[in-house]
Image (cartoon, rainbow, N blue to C red):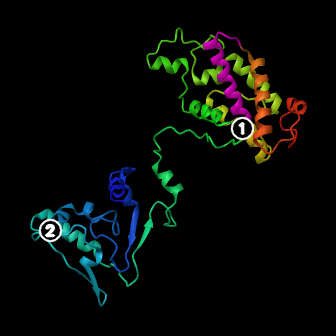
């Protein structure tokens, strides 16, 4: 436990230590550390008045060790190594005294409030939102979005959305020799994630076939993120939208497989071959990995959402 507490004091969120986001609501003052915890003002008193903190004899003292209330009057019981004497120390003491004026205490237990939430209640969601650096690019694809699709396919799309696939462009950035670096499917441009899945001619033709099959409006994808978001254009119910999303993931998987076949096995592949595999794999996986075990192959080939 001591090791965990020690780590928490070192982890920063938005440039602040984690425990700074918990603010003490003073009751009897027995569980809130006077100097170290955040309970009054804009932060811990040790940060607001560092010179006074250095003079404190008991740096872990509690609020009720230093403050008492009698007849509505605040009384502070300081315990210094020596009396504050320099201009800076005296100024800090005056400022601290003013801050403590009007403090209310009671016989009730101290409470803690999680300041990032208006409710004051800690939640994992609020912590996650706080821990994400707004300056960093974000990927909005969720690997958990299509449960009927094998994990390997979800992971592939997640890696592609983060530009972490070993495309020829990525390998060249790591000084790995890959020949010309041109796309294995079209040999017309450098093989990057965006090109392979959206700019390559076989991929463009494949997505056109896919749109007609699923009955999506024709679209133009300029980045891989556009592919990830394609299912949002589907106007059906939630279940059918998840199936469309799964079909998109499987199509990306088949494009990557075709690329590897050409690159490593000297094979050949075109959009018709890839599209046939998309239909076959998606039919097999949806029929056996979901509640849609009554799928009919003939109807599936005409329109994959015929059962909706």
Query: 188 and 222: which one is in front?
Result: 188
Q: Give coordinates of residue 105: x percent, y percent.
A: 35, 81
Residue under label 1:
245
In the rendered image, the quadrant that contains the C terminus is top right
Q: Is residue 267 rendered magenta in the image?
A: yes
Against 186, is 61 above or below? below
Against 186, is 123 above or below? below
Res 260 seen here? yes
Residue drawn at x 65%, y 35% is 228
Part of the protein shown in magenta: 245-268
Q: Is residue 48 rendered magenta in the image?
A: no
Estimate how packed mark 2 is, as few (under 14), some (14 to 19) or many (20 or more) residues with alpha carbons within 10 Å: some
129 left or right of 51 in image: right
Residue under label 2:
90
**Between marks 2 and 1, how big is the CA–CA gap?**
66 Å
- From the viewer's perspective, is the residue at label 2 or at label 1 nearer? 1
Residue drawn at x 46%, y 49% is 131
Query: 245 and 176: which one is in front?
Result: 176
Q: Indicate the secondary structure of the residue bearing disc 1.
A: helix
Q: Give coordinates of residue 226: x percent, y percent.
A: 65, 32
Residue drawn at x 58%, y 30% is 160
């Amino acid at each position: 436990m001591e090791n965990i507490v020690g780590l928490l004091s070192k982890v920063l969120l938005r440039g602040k230590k984690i425990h700074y986001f918990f603010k003490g609501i003073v009751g009897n003052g027995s569980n809130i550390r006077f100097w170290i915890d955040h309970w009054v003002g804009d932060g811990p008193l040790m940060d607001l008045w560092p010179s006074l903190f250095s003079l404190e004899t008991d740096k872990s003292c509690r609020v009720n060790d230093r403050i008492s209330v009698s007849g509505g009057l605040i009384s502070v019981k300081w315990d210094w190594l020596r009396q504050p004497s320099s201009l800076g120390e005296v100024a800090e003491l005056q400022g601290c005294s003013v801050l403590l004026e009007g403090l209310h205490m009671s016989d009730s237990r101290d409470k803690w409030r999680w300041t990032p939430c208006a409710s004051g209640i800690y939640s994992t969601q609020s912590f996650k939102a706080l821990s994400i650096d707004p300056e960093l690019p974000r990927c909005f694809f969720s690997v958990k979005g299509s449960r009927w699709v094998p994990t390997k396919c979800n992971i592939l799309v997640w890696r592609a959305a983060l530009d972490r696939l070993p495309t020829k462009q990525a390998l060249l950035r790591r000084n790995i020799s890959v020949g010309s670096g041109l796309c294995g499917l079209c040999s017309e441009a450098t093989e990057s994630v965006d090109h392979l899945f959206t700019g390559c001619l076989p991929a463009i033709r494949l997505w056109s076939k896919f749109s007609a099959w699923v009955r999506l409006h024709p679209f133009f994808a300029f980045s891989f993120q556009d592919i990830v978001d394609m299912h949002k254009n589907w106007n059906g119910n939630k279940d059918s939208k998840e199936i469309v999303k799964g079909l998109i993931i499987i199509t990306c998987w088949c494009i990557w497989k075709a690329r590897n076949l050409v690159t490593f096995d000297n094979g050949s592949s075109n959009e018709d071959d890839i599209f046939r595999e998309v239909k076959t794999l998606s039919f097999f996986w949806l029929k056996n990995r979901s509640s849609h075990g009554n799928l009919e192959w003939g109807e599936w080939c005409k329109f994959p959402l015929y059962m909706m």
